[in-house]
Image (tube, helix red, strand yellow):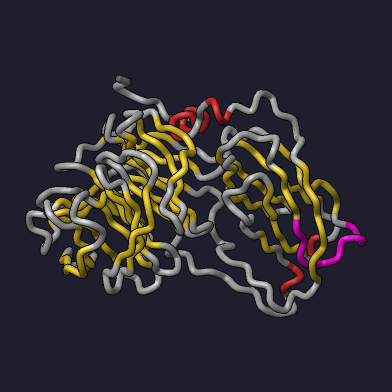
Amino acid sequence: MKKDLLFGCFILLIEFCFSTANFAQNNLSSTGRAHISHQSSDFSHLKITNCSRAQCRYIYYYDVTNYVIGRFPDGPGCPGGKLAYWTPPTFASAGVQGGNGNFYILDSGPPSSLCQLDTSNGNVTILGQINGMEGVIANGIAYNAVNDSYFICGYSGSTNDLYKIDINTLTAKLVSSVGSSGSPMIAIAINSNGIGYGYELMPDNNAYTFDPVTGASALLGSIGFEAGYGQDMDIDIETDIIYLAAFNVNTNNGELRIMDPITGMTTLVSPFPDQISVFEFDNNYNIVPVEFNSILAPLVFSFEQNYPNPLNPTTKISFVIGSAFNGSFVTLKVHDVLGNEVATLVSEEIRQGWTAGEYEVEFNGSELTSGIYYYQLKAGSFIQTKKMIILK
């Protein structure tokens, strides 16, 4: 077993998180096919959100195998790697970013504790023990952006219970039992619409949806693998994709999976060489969106998330081009997780023939293997990168 991982550079970091034979591109050329069509030149409704966000966005993790706090970039070209070594009081069972921008790590206990992660250096501060969950193993933590509240799922040995926690007083209040009583619910997450998701360990291996306010839960279905302890889940609010940092008992491997929010079935994206028990997106809750909603709109860009995502094999990418960019050169390119360019969808100068308005590009990924890819739009000084997943 590896005693130490050197995550100092981007390539090694991506190898740790995502690189497998399925991601090898075998010197793929820029063969992605695209169709572009102009949709509209009416900018009266244009909204640009998160335009103040830095280009580098991270996912923070705890490697329980090597006791490592680290981060990897949610996009190519940003530095990531190991931040610090840390040994939790009992077990680091889950993590979450809150509406205040802080990152929290849940120590399972009992007694359970809440810790805060300093993302600049990986240092972890124990904020204190959680009151109101005596004798309960705290397995998952989630943040509800709809009403700025935090929730913990705990297992008492006979029931899975959902608690609402006051992040300032560290006091937990029971909401309701969720899921079944036969298996511990190992992780929870809440999407941007306030809908909760969670899943249980073996022998049930089922996914559930729940209402954080009432605690009412409903069975979605099987997750499709034998789940063990030491797992986390989080939702990327930019795409609402549900990610699992799972541990598969059958393969004895950590795995990155995504969950279908309708059926609960999960799909393997890539194996992890080690076990990840904390997995939390930088969801930028503390960034106030900036909106432009006037005749100023044609001066700016809007770059939308591709749909559908995940894709098989086609998807559509929309963006708004503004009159202020006349004379600029526009490129829209697709890269793999190692930063290799695999497709060029747009590459031309904005001239008089370009009308300010919305454009749509259809991308066909049939010649690429399953995995995570990034598409980047450049126009003048405007640069923005988004993520898409190909599943076959």
Residue occupying the point 77% across, 43% down: 33
Residue occupying the point 59% across, 27% down: 24
Among the 4 quarters of the image, the one containing residue 320: bottom right
Residue 252: x percent and y percent?
Answer: 32, 29
Q: Foreground: 175 or 313?
A: 313
Q: Foreground: 47 or 206?
A: 206
- Vertical relation: 107 (above or below) 270: below
Q: Is residue 331 left or right of residue 162?
A: right
The reply to whether residue 243 is visible in this rendering is yes
The question of residue 55 being in magenta is answered with: no
Instruction: Give the residues drawn in magenta, as a range.
Output: 351-360
The reply to whether residue 102 is visible in this rendering is no
- Vertical relation: 20 (above or below) 38: above
Q: Is residue 141 left or right of residue 77?
A: left
Instruction: Please state, as top left, top right, bottom left or bottom right, where the C terminus lies in the image.
Output: top right
Residue occupying the point 34% across, 58% down: 208
Residue 105: x percent and y percent?
Answer: 27, 50
Q: Foreground: 8 or 222?
A: 222
Q: Is residue 19 left or right of residue 223?
A: right
- Which SS does the magenta portion mostly show? loop
Residue 287: x percent and y percent?
Answer: 47, 64
Residue occupying the point 41% across, 41% down: 71
Residue 376: x percent and y percent?
Answer: 66, 47
- Vertical relation: 255 (above or below) 40: above
Instruction: Please state, as top left, top right, bottom left or bottom right, where the N terminus lies in the image.
Output: top left
